[in-house]
Amino acid sequence: MRIWVLTFTMCCVFLAVRAVFAQSPGSDSGLIANPVFIKNCAKCHGKTAEGHRFGGPSLISQKTAAASADDLRDIIANGKGHMPKFIGKLTSEEIDTLVKQDTDFFTLVFTLIVFGGSS
Ligand code: HEC
């Protein structure tokens, strides 16, 4: 009996999540759909931002999600270790968008993994 209650609850949550995403068309693909990311970042951080064997770390890790927007902006603008600097290559608006999408992205991917779909 308990399994049905659980299944029912999961379905409700799933539908609620889909409804939320359906209300914000365009914003649900975020970072990995951003042409700036695909062009400048995907080769090191991977097309799905999960990191790349030879390059950058995952950008959807808890660590990145926990980093402050200022820190992320600083890393993207000024580089760090093997991460190249993008100041001069990207406008500050483009960097701000990447920072925002990166912090939103962890939440989104987590939701998708747990609830198994996007709209
Ligand atoms: C040449 C490969 C390369 C490219 C291109 C690249 N990165 Fe990185 N990135 C790295 C490496 C390597 C690190 C790890 C630096 C370190 O910690 O020493 C990193 C680190 C980062 C971090 C910090 C992650 C953390 O958890 O500390 C962020 C955020 C980031 N990159 C975003 C971007 C964005 C956004 C772009 C595109 C504008 C980009 N990177 C392009 C290689 C790259």
Image (cartoon, grey):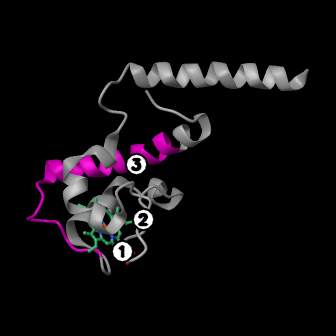
Q: Secondary structure at mark 1?
A: loop
Rounded to the nearest angstrom, the CA distance separating label 3 from label 1 is 20 Å
What residue would you read off at disc 3?
103
Residue type beneath disc 1: Gly
Separation (CA) of disc 1 from disc 2 = 7 Å
Quadrant into which the C terminus falls: top left
Q: Mark 1 highlights which residue? A: 55
Mark 1 Cβ inside 8 Å of ligand 1: yes
Q: Which mark is residue 31?
A: none
Residue 30 x, y percent position in the rendering? 33, 41
What segment carries the magenta color?
83-109
Q: Amino acid at mark 3?
A: Thr
- How far from the left and from the top, in percent, is residue 110? 54, 44
| Mark 2: C-beta under 8 Å from nearest atom of ligand 1 | no
Q: Residue at x 41, y 46 (%)?
A: 105
Look at mark 2 in the image and give the residue it sits on: 51
The quarter holding residue 73 reads bottom left
Can I make out residue 100 in this image?
no
